[in-house]
Amino acid sequence: MKKTILYDKHYNLGAKILPFAGYSMPIVYPDGILSECKEVRNNVGIFDVSHMGQFRISGLGSKEFLQKLLINDITKLKVGDAQYTAMCNFEGGVIDDMILYKEKKSFLLIVNASNIDKNFDWMSKMNSSYNVNLDNISDQNSLIAVQGPNSRKTLESILNQNISNDFYTFIESSYKNSKIFISRTGYTGELGFEIMASNEIIKFLWDEFIDMKVKPCGLASRDILRIEMKYCLYGNDMDETITPYESNLGWITSLNKGDFIGKDTIIKKKDTYKLVGFKMLERGIPRKGYEVLQDNKVIGKVTSGTQSPVLNCGIGLARIKTDSIKHQKQIKILIREKQVEAKLYLKPFIKKTSLKT
């Protein structure tokens, strides 16, 4: 089992550590999940996301290579921009979702930890016609995510500089005479920044945040926070058998940009299933795999579910037949052989956040 560069710090802070995507990762700290979620929504928290993969793509043809490989339109990007996107197989299934950054002379791709080897192998195979430079730099750097309404103020205090980059953009800065990469992105729905730097520099930065009483947060609270915003998780809400439109990723699928891998099948299956949110109206915690019913007929399955500490009720995501979606229509979730009342929720569960501040 791999360990991130911050493993000892998590251990010393009393985190519960469990395997995740091949890494020993902090799941929750002693103050508990509720405390972590509320701190991110109301103040600021810090996450270790160093398990995420990092690829750099450069050389002649790299733009054309990525335009063919990814479902979003990279021609919209200028230097300093970030773009949420995904990579599909020939059958239109999602190999992985990822964030692409346009640097001055290259592209940086941040991918899910569980898919690092799979992604790199697929990209290497597809590269045979382009011959671009494809480098896996995952072991060279580490990543932390600082999230919450006070994340900017806290980061500015540590770096002693103004941080004013817009949502889904990045800047390069310095800390202890070393280059750091600061992206205004995150997985919580709050104002936040993801910081990439050398392994040693990330250790120093982590300590600075902890010294400023920023609450360390684990993967359990991160999962709840993303479900509250209806953000997808690879392996739950999408996989290689599910197309982008079936994963509520139609908004990043650029059908007008020209040909890309999986396009034809994606179009054919565009209106079959949809990923929707739901809120429990009765007591019960939905879990992945639970059946969704409407008029006593199974119309889909839960892909992600949890108990929201902010909303104080069960919430989740479900993939259901598109023709079953009716606004304000109640559904039922089969929990331990009991049909429990729920309601379709087509927007994020948390309506007001600090995301765009």
Image (cartoon, rainbow, N blue to C red):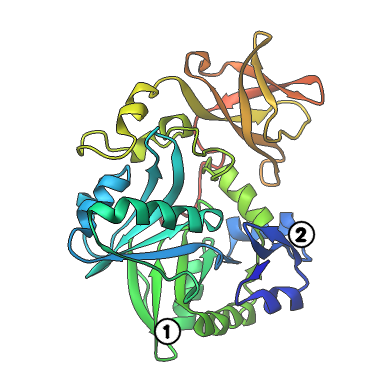
> Does residue 320 sit above or below 44 in this rendering?
above
Q: Local crowd at mark 1 within 10 Å, few (<14), some, or many (≥20)? A: few
Return the residue at label 1: 160
**Farthest residue, direction bottom:** 177
Q: Is residue 249 left or right of residue 353?
A: left
Above/below status of 54 relative to 119:
below
The amino acid marked with disc number 1 is Asn
Where residue 212 sits, quadrant-wise, is bottom right
Residue at (40% x, 62% y) in the render:
184
Cα separation, mark 1 vs mark 2, equals 31 Å
Q: Assess disc 2: are there few (<14), some (14-19) or many (≥20) residues with their C-alpha within 10 Å of its C-alpha.
A: some
Q: Any mark on residue 242, and which?
A: none
Query: Dot 2 lies on which element?
Result: loop
Looking at the rendered image, the quarter that the C terminus falls into is bottom left
Q: Quadrant of the N terminus?
A: bottom right
- In the image, residue 308 lies at what x, y percent? 68, 43
Image x and y of residue 326, in percent: 51, 15
The three-letter amino acid code for the residue at tag 2 is Gly
Q: Quadrant of residue 57?
A: bottom left
Q: Nearer the viewer, residue 102 or 67?
A: 67
The residue at 62%/50% (across/down) is 223
Viewer-nearest residue: 146 or 38: 146
Compared across the picture, whether 279 is left or right of 324 comes to right
Percent of width and height locating residue 262: 34, 35
12 up-or-down from 238: above or below? below
Name the side, left or right, on which 172 lies relative to 65: right
Does the rendering let one see residue 320?
A: yes
SS class, disc 1: loop
Residue at the far left: name it.
60
Mark closest to the chain's N terminus, 1 or 2: 2
Q: Are marks 1 and 2 in contact (CB under 8 Å)?
A: no
Residue at numbered disc 2: 32
